[in-house]
Amino acid sequence: MSMRSRLGFLAAALSLGICACDGGKVGGGGPDGSGGAPGSGGASTGAGGVPGSGGAPGTGGATIIPDAGATGGGGGAARDGGADTAGPGSGGATGTGGRATGGATGAGGARDGGTDTTGQPPITIWIAGDSTVATGSAPCPIGWGGLFKPFFNNQVTVTNSAVAGRSVRTWLYFPELTMDATGECILPLDATGNPQIQPRWQAMLNGMKAGDYLFIQFGINDSDPTCDRHVGLDAFKASYGVMAQAAQARGAHPVFLTPVSSIACSSANVPVATRGGFVPATTQAGTQFGVPVIDLNKLSVALYTQRGFCPIPGGDVSATTTGPVGDFFCDDHTHFSAMGAPDIAALVANAVKAQIPGLAAYMK
């Protein structure tokens, strides 16, 4: 072999030895893991280094399971998700921190019952009275008490306990048919020495609460000269006081009404007031016991005047009476028909608006 050929062979061999003896390549890092350790340097035989083991994937931040948003008046605020507190895996890519999804905002709770849009507490109007107040039945007689509820909102309950034919004392108690030395009907006493009371009054006392109202209207049958309905003016005022003070003791508000007038005409053919001394006695009782008084007597006479009820055909109301006055009253000059009673109820309602602001706030 010539010298030139030997030199060429030697150069080729050296070239091969360099390629084989170059240090082994760094092993590829495992996904999300630590990079492989460098391979051991290859021997002169050129064996490549063993690839490094891939590092374990980095542990991401733990996900916090959130509390659900509270349902009710206050919405549940979204809770913060778990922060990524784990460091990157050795040699691996940083794990993606989990982040919680906040709870949905709770829906606002509806008001109890879903009907009170006024914010007013519920109240009851209790009514005590006679036939001009009692609910009655169609076509006659009809009292204003049974027609009172429509003037008020849904927060008001009207309990009409008026009873036809009653004086204030026969409504409250059990008067006997004989009079005592003072000219009043004797009242039977209970075991405590107090007058025995009617169940209707006891029911009112049991149910009455703070904020309620008690409407009281008598003074028609009380003028009866005989027992058991007879009530003298002083006893009349005292009886009103008993009822008013019982209501006040329970936080309720009594209201007195003068007795509604019957229709009567003067010689000049204009309506005049009836019911005698029970009208001023009601006003006096209001002053004495600190109770507002609706003068229904005066209001009713003004209404009769406005309607032109006088002169009455035939001189007084009867089953044969025609025209406006016959339509307004029943077969007498005292009781109201289905056409007249709503107008009397409206008189009372308008007086409430003008005189009793606390109750007027509940009116439609």
Image (cartoon, grey):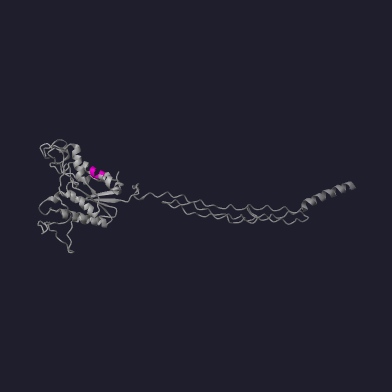
What residue is drawn where x is 87% and y is 48%?
Answer: 7
Q: Position of residue 357 (x, y in %)?
A: 30, 47
In front of the other: 109 or 159: 159
Quadrant of residue 327 within the rendered picture: top left
Please state the horizontal and vertical placement of residue 97, each as a whole percent of the image. Answer: 57, 53
- How many dots with numbers? 0
Q: Is residue 193 left or right of residue 156?
A: left
Q: Quadrant of the C terminus?
A: top left
x and y percent of residue 271 in the render? 16, 40
> Does 119 sit above or below residue 266?
below
Q: Nearer the viewer, residue 62 or 257?
A: 257
Query: Do we see residue 301 in this rendering?
Result: yes
As drawn, the residue found furthest toward the front would be 268
Comparing 34 with 147, the one in front is 147
> Along the horizontal axis of the image, is 257 left or right of 321?
right
**Residue furthest top in the image:** 323
Q: Residue at x 90, y 48 (%)?
A: 3
Q: Judge left or right: residue 321 versus residue 204.
A: left
Is residue 161 in view from this perspective? Answer: no
- Horizontal and vertical percent position of residue 323: 15, 35
Residue pictured at 18% horizontal, 54% vertical: 237
Which of these two is toward me, 168 or 57?
168
Is residue 109 a member of the stretch shown in magenta?
no
The magenta segment is 346-350
Mostly what secondary structure, the magenta segment? Answer: helix
Q: At 23% from the left edge and 43% from the top edge, which residue is drawn?
A: 347
